[in-house]
């Protein structure tokens, strides 16, 4: 075992040079090995990792950023962590970024434009190498911060156009329109739209449903059930009970999210409302458990994992100074036609 004469800083921290001496390699090899760069020989990586673990070495991200003139983290701003939709996206982003030597710094905006702007200001103080932000509904301050920071940025979950805009997502409105067309083609005429949270993407889905109902000559504002409360199974059950009591002619309900639709199916069982014979029920996002409901839930499957993967790859290319084409990637959606509608 190589003896290590410590050259620790005044703080007592083990340095990268200490690890290099212990592993009998150069400091740059230690840096590359610990960043996970694939060009480093696996045997050297193992030796470096063993030395770092034995010495208790903890990398100093601030020092690394100063030395390399670039950060090793990516700021990711999402609305919620309680929504499985964004958990799936985050996991996909991290799977792509970590092998390239980047870590994610997560900010939760709670669907609040001002909170998002403040989070972005705080994140930019850490000089991130890149940004991933949700959607395009930002405050003017946020738009200016992104534009003036010079930090590569990719928008997720929606698609858009414009100079310098990079995004990966799908059309929320068209996905909702497609499900509404399916219900209409199945003979449904009094199709209600149930929504919670009322964030920008929910309102885009509302617009897709509304346009299809208007084109069919069947739109009625009384069929819109909009609640700003957080989306949940309990709220879905409550909304379904209210709809069937106050609008008995409703023959289908399209919910903006699967947890609402799952709650509706549970309420239908309790109320002895036959689904889909009496009322069809459809959801959005194909969340865990939707295929196990009784009856199995018809829904829109959204490609959140693929969005996370492709957004991370696009951002990696931008951070490396590579040209990205196309700049707007539409991954589409899928109708999962099951027993409930």
Image: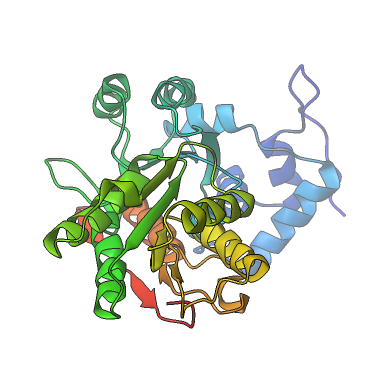
Q: Nearer the viewer, residue 73 or 21?
A: 73
- Residue 62 placement (x, y as % from top left): 57, 27
Which part of the image, by quadrant, shows the C terminus? bottom left
What residue is shown at x 55% (from left), y 79% (from top)? 296
- Would residue 136 appear left or right of 258 to someone viewing this image? left
Please tell me whether residue 187 is drawn above or below residue 92 in the rendered image.
below
Task: Tell which of 331 and 66 is nearer to you.
Answer: 331
Counting the numbered discs, the total is: 0
Whether residue 215 is visible, yes or no, is: yes
Quarter residue 27 falls in = top right
Measuring from the top left, give residue 4's x and y in whole percent.
Answer: 83, 40
Question: x%, y% of residue 157?
Answer: 35, 52
Which quarter of the rendered picture does the N terminus lie within? bottom right
Q: Nearer the viewer, residue 60 or 48?
A: 60
- The vertical placement of 194 against 183, above or below, is above
Is 272 above or below relative to 324? Answer: below
Q: Quadrant of residue 145?
A: top left
At which x and y percent is residue 245? Answer: 51, 55
Tell me the quarter of the picture where residue 147 sits.
Answer: top left
């Amino acid at each position: 075992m190589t003896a290590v004469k410590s050259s620790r800083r005044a703080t007592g921290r083990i340095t990268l040079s200490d690890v290099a001496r212990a592993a009998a390699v150069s400091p740059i090899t230690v840096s590359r090995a610990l960043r996970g760069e694939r060009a480093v020989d696996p045997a050297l990586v193992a030796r470096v990792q063993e030395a770092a673990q034995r010495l208790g070495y903890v990398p100093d991200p601030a020092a690394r950023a100063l030395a390399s003139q670039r950060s090793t983290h990516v700021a990711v701003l999402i609305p919620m962590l309680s929504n499985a939709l964004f958990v799936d996206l985050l996991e996909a982003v991290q799977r792509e970024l970590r092998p390239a030597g980047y870590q994610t710094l997560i900010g939760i905006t709670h669907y609040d434009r001002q909170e998002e702007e403040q989070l972005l200001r705080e994140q930019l103080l850490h000089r991130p190498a890149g940004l991933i932000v949700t959607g395009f509904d930002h405050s003017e301050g946020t738009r200016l911060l992104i534009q003036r920071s010079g930090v590569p940025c990719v928008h997720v979950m929606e698609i858009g156009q414009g100079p310098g805009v990079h995004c990966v997502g799908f059309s929320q409105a068209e996905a909702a329109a497609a499900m509404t067309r399916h219900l209409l083609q199945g003979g449904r005429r009094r199709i209600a739209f149930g929504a919670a949270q009322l964030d920008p993407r929910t309102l885009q889905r509302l617009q897709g449903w509304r346009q299809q109902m208007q084109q069919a000559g069947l739109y009625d504002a009384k069929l819109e059930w909009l609640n700003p409360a957080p989306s949940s199974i309990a709220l879905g059950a409550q909304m379904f009970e209210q709809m069937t009591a106050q609008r008995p002619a409703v023959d289908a309900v399209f919910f903006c999210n699967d947890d609402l639709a799952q709650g509706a199916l549970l309420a239908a069982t309790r109320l002895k409302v036959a689904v889909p014979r009496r009322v069809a029920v459809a959801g959005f996002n194909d969340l865990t458990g939707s295929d196990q409901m009784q009856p199995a839930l018809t829904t829109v499957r959204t490609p959140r994992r693929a969005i996370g993967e492709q957004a991370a790859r696009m951002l990696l290319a931008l951070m490396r100074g590579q040209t990205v084409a196309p700049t707007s990637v539409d991954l589409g959606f899928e109708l999962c036609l099951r027993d409930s509608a």
